[in-house]
Structures are given as C-alpha cells and as structure tokens.
Image: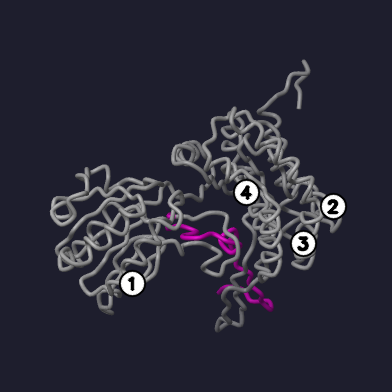
C-alpha cells in the first residue's frame, strides 16, 4: 500500500489488514459450525491434491535457508515432506470434527423471578499470531482460530515465506468455495520487523496476540502489546524423584522427559531427587542420561554420588537448555522439593514419580504450574495428547487461559438473560 508519493506505507498497511480482520470477525461470529467444518474438510482435501505445489514452494524456502543462518534442526522443522503434508491435512480433519464451541451454553440458571441466565461461549474476535518458521503451524493456527470463530492475522518467519503463502492460498481458496469471509485469514505480506510493532499498537482492532517463538520475541511482544498476550516465556520443567519412586518407572520417565525430544518447551531441564534415593536411583538415572550424551550439572551431593557431574550454578537451576544438559538438586524431603521447584520453575510442566498417594496429592496441590504430572513424562503437556485437538500454544498465565490452548481457549463468553417482562424492584 503506497502513500501519495507511491511509497509503501507500512503503518497504513498494518492498519488496513487489522481493519479487514475486524470486519471479517463480525461475519465469522455468525457463521455456522457446518460451514466451518466444510471449510476445514475442503482445506485438507486441497492440501493433499496440491502436494506438488506445496513442496515446490517449500523448496524455495529450503534453498534460501542457508542464507538466513538456519541450523540443521531449524531446516528440518522448515521442511515440508509428503508425509508432513499428509499429517497437516489430517490435523485439519481432526479439528473439523471437534465439537462446535461457539454458542455453547457453559452454565445456566433460572432465577426465582423467572429470569433465565445463560453463560454462552463467544469468539474473542481478532487474533494476531506471531510464530517461528514451521509451515504446519500456519495451517494449525488458521484452523483453530476460524473454528473458534476468530479472524486471524498470521505473521510467520521470513524463512518460510513461500511455504506459508502457499498454505494460506489454499485455505483462502477453500474459504471462497464454502463462503468464508474473504479476510478471515490474512498473512502479513512484509518481512519488515517493524510491522509487528504497528500491529501491537492496534487494540481497537486486535483482541489477542499470541507470540510463539524464542523468549526474546515473547518478551518484546509482552512489553509492547496494547492488547492481552497469551504466552509462556520458557519451559524449565522439573521431574522430582520421590523417596518411594519405582526405580524402573523413574528411569523410564526421566529419560523420556529429557531425551525423547530436547528442543521443545515440555522437555525436562531439571531433576530433583529425595535424599533417600541418592545412593540408589540417582547414580542409575544419571548414568542412563550420560549414556545418551546428556551433561549433568549438580549440587555437591549429586557430585559426591555421581562424580562425572559438573558443578551447578544458580543460573543452571533457572535454565531452559533446549539441548543435552540437565541440572540436578538433592533435597531433604517433599516440602523442600516443592519449594525448590516453585522457586526455579517457569510454571510450565512439573512431574513427580512416587508410589505415595499423599505425596502425589501434596505435589499436585502445591506446585504452581500450568500442568502437573504424576508418574508420567512432562512431554505429555500438549493439546493433542490432552485430547484438545491441535493447540495454538501453551500459556503459563493464570488469567483467561492456562496450559495447552485449543479452540475453547480462543473463546470468551457473555451472559444472555431471557425474561418475560421482569423489572427490578
């Protein structure tokens, strides 16, 4: 969009995108669940049919990836293979089959004066979604937002520009086929980082911003946004091995929580051991981690029983490594474990391994995190694993949404009151 001199006006462009999204959100709020379901099914069908076009677009991004300084792991996340496109289409089909959230009566009551009071689920409105260079996230986010009745403005990474555009083109074509509002989904058409700042200053048009990426991005968005932000800053997840833990179970859970996939927010970064198991379980579990290439950083007691461990600093206990390092702390009892975890936790996911029911109950009551696991890996904190369908992110906030955020977390509610002429005396 140019000004009177024909020069692209970034601020005006962002404002126009937001205005279009707001107008589309009004239409989306009225759209039937059947239309949204048809749209998602049509999107899935077209993605399977356009597999060659999608991979061709992705190859352009992959060819440019080295110039952006992407690591091998980042390039792998960027890649769209036929199997990944199939998986993306399946995710859309699964979202299509989720219950329609909009219009659901969450709670109702008939008052003594005959008034019917209903709490009804409604869309948030317009969502501004900023995310890393994983093309499948484009489809997931658009699907979840529209399914929950929201218009979405997508700001993907420049590294996936061609892939994201190809996906959005398919979803917009499917939208035109079934009668979706034209601007229900918009992909920001400029890589200029200042665009984000402009969007963050439009609370009159954008109802919620969701940043999904590195901590520096999320902190910038949180600091600048004039509207609510759904986010988590980091994933310093703990596993506490209690005095009564089953040895085989403890080893299996710790190894899975740390090693199954290290570069994700629900991977374990910190281990806490009850002092009663330092001579038995601690060496066994740390050896299992070391054999898988994990560097151990522990306190004095840890290093006494596992000499290969390096000294842990205060920063280590706060760290989200996203790689082959883990911090270890030995504590006196359950109370000390809970105190340690609540101090250093990023409030994402914590787990206890125990055969003591009372210890498990105390842990779940007193740990202040979005998800608490009993005898299960931290890796299960995920919308799909929880049965929510796909997720748009994980929130560690306490207000509005907490934990994996699916379609219900992208809604609000209003009270609808039905009377028969009642007036208040």
Residue located beneath label 3 in the image: 31
Residue located beneath label 4 in the image: 127
Q: Which dot, 2 or 1, sits closer to the camera?
A: 1
The quadrant where residue 31 appears? bottom right
Q: CA distance from mark 2 to mark 1?
A: 52 Å
Residue located beneath label 1 in the image: 249
Q: Is residue 273 left or right of residue 163?
A: left
Instruction: Note whether 284 is above or below 161 in the view shown.
Output: below
Locate residue 170, reporting x and y percent. Answer: 79, 49
* Numbered disc 1: secondary structure: helix
Mark 3 or 1, nearer chain start: 3
Between 407 and 126, the one lying in front of the other is: 407
Q: Residue at x 29, y 74 (%)?
A: 360
Q: Is residue 331 left or right of residue 60?
A: left
Q: CA distance from mark 4 to mark 1?
A: 42 Å
* Numbered disc 3: secondary structure: loop
Position of the N terminus, as image quadrant, is top right
Q: Residue at x 58, y 34 (%)?
A: 196
Q: CA distance from mark 4 to mark 2?
A: 21 Å
Locate residue 336, reporting x and y percent. Answer: 18, 62
* Numbered disc 2: secondary structure: helix
Locate residue 369, reporting x and y percent. Answer: 37, 60
On whether residue 418 falls in the magenta region, the answer is: yes
The quadrant where residue 158 appears? top right
Locate residue 103, reporting x and y percent. Answer: 67, 69
Task: State which region is magenta.
Answer: 396-425
Q: Which mark is residue 176?
A: 2
Mark 4 or 1, nearer chain start: 4
């Amino acid at each position: 969009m140019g000004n009177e001199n024909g020069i692209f006006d970034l601020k005006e462009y962002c404002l126009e995108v937001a205005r279009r999204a707001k107008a589309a959100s009004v239409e989306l709020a009225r759209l039937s669940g059947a239309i949204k379901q048809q749209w998602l099914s049509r999107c899935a069908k077209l993605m399977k049919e356009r597999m060659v076009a999608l991979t061709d677009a992705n190859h352009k991004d992959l060819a440019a990836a080295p110039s952006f300084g992407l690591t091998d792991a980042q390039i792998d996340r960027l890649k769209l293979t036929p199997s990944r496109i199939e998986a993306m289409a399946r995710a859309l089909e699964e979202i299509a089959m989720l219950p329609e959230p909009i219009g659901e009566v969450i709670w109702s009551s008939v008052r003594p004066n005959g008034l019917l009071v209903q709490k009804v689920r409604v869309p948030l409105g317009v969502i501004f979604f900023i995310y890393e260079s994983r093309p499948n996230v484009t489809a997931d986010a658009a699907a979840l937002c529209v399914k929950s009745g929201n218009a979405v403005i997508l700001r993907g990474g420049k590294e996936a520009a061609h892939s994201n555009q190809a996906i959005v083109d398919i979803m917009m074509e499917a939208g035109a086929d079934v009668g979706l509002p034209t601007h229900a989904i918009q992909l920001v058409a400029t890589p200029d980082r200042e665009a984000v700042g402009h969007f963050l200053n439009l609370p009159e048009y954008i109802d919620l911003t969701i940043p999904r990426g590195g901590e520096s991005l999320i902190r910038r968005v949180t600091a600048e946004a004039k509207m609510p932000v759904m986010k988590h800053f980091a994933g310093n997840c703990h596993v506490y091995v209690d005095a009564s833990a089953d040895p085989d179970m403890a080893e299996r859970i710790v190894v899975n929580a740390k090693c199954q996939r290290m570069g994700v927010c629900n991977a374990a970064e910190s281990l806490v051991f009850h002092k009663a198991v330092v001579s038995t379980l601690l060496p066994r579990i740390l050896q299992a981690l070391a054999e898988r290439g994990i560097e151990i950083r522990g306190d004095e007691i840890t290093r006494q029983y596992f000499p290969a461990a390096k000294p842990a600093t205060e920063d280590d206990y706060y760290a989200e490594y996203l790689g082959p390092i883990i911090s270890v702390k030995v504590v006196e009892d359950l109370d000390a474990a809970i105190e340690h975890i609540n101090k250093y936790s990023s409030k994402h996911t914590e787990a206890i391994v125990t055969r003591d029911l009372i210890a498990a109950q105390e842990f779940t009551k007193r740990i202040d995190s979005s998800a608490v696991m009993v005898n299960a890996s931290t890796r299960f904190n995920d919308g799909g694993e929880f049965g929510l369908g796909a997720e748009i992110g994980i929130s560690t906030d306490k207000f509005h949404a907490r934990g994996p955020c699916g379609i219900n977390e992208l809604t609000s509610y209003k009270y609808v009151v039905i009377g028969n002429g009642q007036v208040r005396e």
